[in-house]
Amino acid sequence: MKMLLLATLSLTGATLAQAAPVEVFNADTQCASRMTGTGERFVPPCQFSSQSMTADRNTAYSSDGLVRNGSFKTILNYNFVCESLRPLSVRYTLSAGSDASETNRIAGSRINEINTLSMVHGNHDADLVFNGLDGVVGFQAIKPGCQLNVNQLLTYPEPSYFGQLASHLVTHNGVIKSLVSIAQPSTSSVQLVSSIDNTLDLLSNLTFDIEDPIFLDQITTAQADLERSKAVFTNNCRAGSSSSHCTIELSRLRQVLQNNLTWNEAGIRSLHTYLSEQTRWLSGQSIGRDALVLSNAVNRLRSRL
């Protein structure tokens, strides 16, 4: 299950990338005006209707199973500057499929700065509803300029997940290629068994971190095939043996490894294409260090193309 980390925001009927920043709340226009001894103040009642939007997202080249099974990150950059007699906040409910949902508040601050909230979820669109205002009943006075603006709301590949997936695919590629180079008729059964053992250890280490079920299935299938070959070479072959039984098993092993390598290389090409498009799309967005992590994943995959 993909885990919810923090929160994100949105607004009705608008695509953030087309009209940012988006004004969610403005006390100057949505609350009643009153002159006081210290100047104009805004007081209840304040008009606020439920509002929602879906995070912007680039789905190009996302049909591959390795992508569909991945984790995704939704990030919100917002600015809620507000000075008021009593604390003022906006309630929201966030959801992204059945695995991520949270209800919380965004509080106004005297500091005029961009704040960031984020969540990690499965392969779903992230939607958020602004449910209403808190702090606008009873005795309240809000200074002019109290606004909540959404500056950026978008969903993109979760960098840690896809960075690790890219690393595992590249490692898997190197491990299988190495064994293919060793699984030759001139290699002794003792050396081959030792190489199979090393490969099994490396694949076992990979399985601890792999979250993608398709990739994990490839690894576990390869492990079972290698265990079978190891048993044959250990029990039925001797160094320098040229028996037909050993030759047949060596041929079968090489075919298994090649099939595994074919799947792996297709996955590397597909993920490289997808993440390259994502980094291009995200180049104009403010996502901090996430951009570097995704760029490094692209470079890692490119090293095996």
Image (spheres, rainbow, N blue to C red):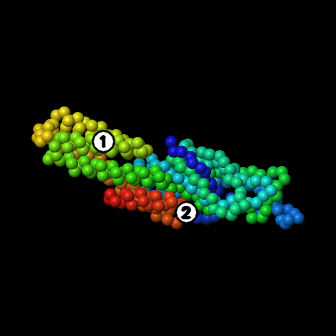
Q: Looking at the picture, how far across and down is residue 207, in whole percent?
A: 38, 42
Indicate the secondary structure of the residue bearing disc 1.
Answer: helix
Nearer mark to the viewer, of 2 and 1: 1
Residue 255 appears in view? no
Q: Residue furthest right?
A: 37
Q: Tell me: 256 left or right of 12.
A: left
Q: Which residue is mark 2?
A: 286
Q: Amino acid at mark 2?
A: Ser
> Which image quadrant for residue 229?
top left
Residue 234 appears in view? yes
Dot label at residue 210: none
How many marks are shown on the rendered structure?
2
Q: Residue at x 61, y 65 (%)?
A: 19
Q: Looking at the picture, how far across and down is residue 111, in whole percent?
A: 70, 62
Q: Looking at the picture, how far across and down is residue 239, in whole percent?
A: 14, 40
Q: Which residue is mark 1?
A: 200
Q: Nearer the viewer, residue 56 or 216?
A: 216
Image quadrant for the C terminus? Answer: bottom left
